[in-house]
Image (cartoon, rainbow, N blue to C red):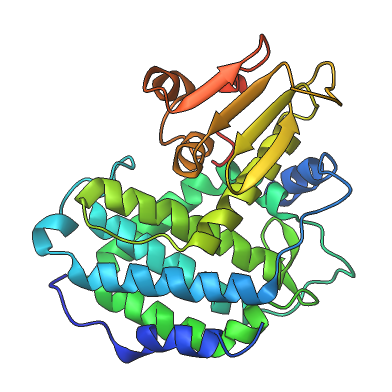
Amino acid sequence: MCPRSVRPQAQGLRARAVTRRGEGTAARKLDRMAPTKLRSYDPLRVRNALTAQVEAVAAAAHALTAEQYAMPSGLPGWDVHHLVVHIAGQIDAVPRLLARPEPDASATTVSPSTWALSTATAAKGLDEATRTAAVAATDAAARVDEAVEQLEPVLEAAVRPDLLLPHPFGAIRALDYTVTRLVELVVHTDDLVRATGLRVPLDRQALAATVRLLADALAVKAPGGAVEVRIPPFAVTQCVAGPRHTRGTPPNTVETDPLTFLRLATGRTTWEAARARRVVRASGQRADLSPHLPVLG
């Protein structure tokens, strides 16, 4: 866990990236709630965002001291070593899933929103797997390096919109699955920053994709058009059952910044705490999102 220099493969990801553009049943039930028009993601932007955030995390893993690795992560029962090992597992989750046989499906059965709303069903298993991996990986930075090595050769396949992958929740497009890895990387980079005080950049496109996916998931979890949720400059969505607003200034609005929304949507902070800190502006009788948060398990 001692700091080391960043290995060349992590630095080389960006150079290549810019050269071109139980659980299953629950997931299917959630998917029937999803909007008929799904958000599309640009493969080049997703690829570049992935490589940028991976590089940032890899650099951070090597910059952390032994004392920082031993700090609590803010996640129950995990120190920073557990957190970084878990991040490594999110990086090489893409090549691991790509290595499996394609699913016996002709179309996707899992959208990014479905994935977000189904993660709670897998939380216990992921926690146990992370604890086991953290014991096995005595050097968390080296574990990140290994994950980067696995990811590098499959970057093109990782953003294919026509390739289906066999996720435990159901068939998911490779591009959509890679967007879910962006969410994991962005959320846990923020965890790392808050736990250690280390300055780790969040790639703008990665943060944008994360906010949009979580906003879409909120709209699926709390369907309706009574409340307009604004997360400038990345997303606007309508949610919560009730009278739908069509013209002029909406009577029920919620507005916050991207990081606050990310923390609300993932349970890192509460609605009440965010309101008390005045980082959320809410107006209207229905502008209370606390019954619908978090959206990511």
Q: In what quadrant of the picture does the C terminus appear?
A: top right
Report the number of numbered marks: 0
In this rendering, is residue 274 above or below 46? above
Q: Is residue 38 above or below residue 216?
A: below
Residue situated in front as seen by the camera: 262 or 22: 262
State the residue at coordinates (12%, 64%): 65
Q: Is residue 62 left or right of residue 96?
A: left
- Relative to the observer, which residue lies in front, 77 or 234? 234
Quick one: which residue is furthest to the front in this view? 248
At horizontal 21% and vertical 50% (from top left) the residue drawn is 197
Which quadrant, please, contains the N terminus? bottom left
Q: Residue shown at 70%/28% (left/top)?
A: 228
| Residue 140 visible, this angle | no
Residue 262 appears at what percent x and percent y? 50, 42
Judging depth in this view, the residue of 228 and 70 nearest the camera is 228
Image location of residue 29, percent across then percent down? 80, 41
- Residue 291 position, x and y percent, is 60, 20
| Relative to 241, residue 5 above or below | below
Q: Position of residue 14 (x, y in %)?
A: 46, 83
Describe residue 53's horizontal placement relative to residue 41 as left or right. Answer: left
Q: Would you say residue 134 is visible in this rendering?
A: yes
Q: Is residue 232 left or right of residue 69?
A: right
Pick the front one: 270 or 205: 205
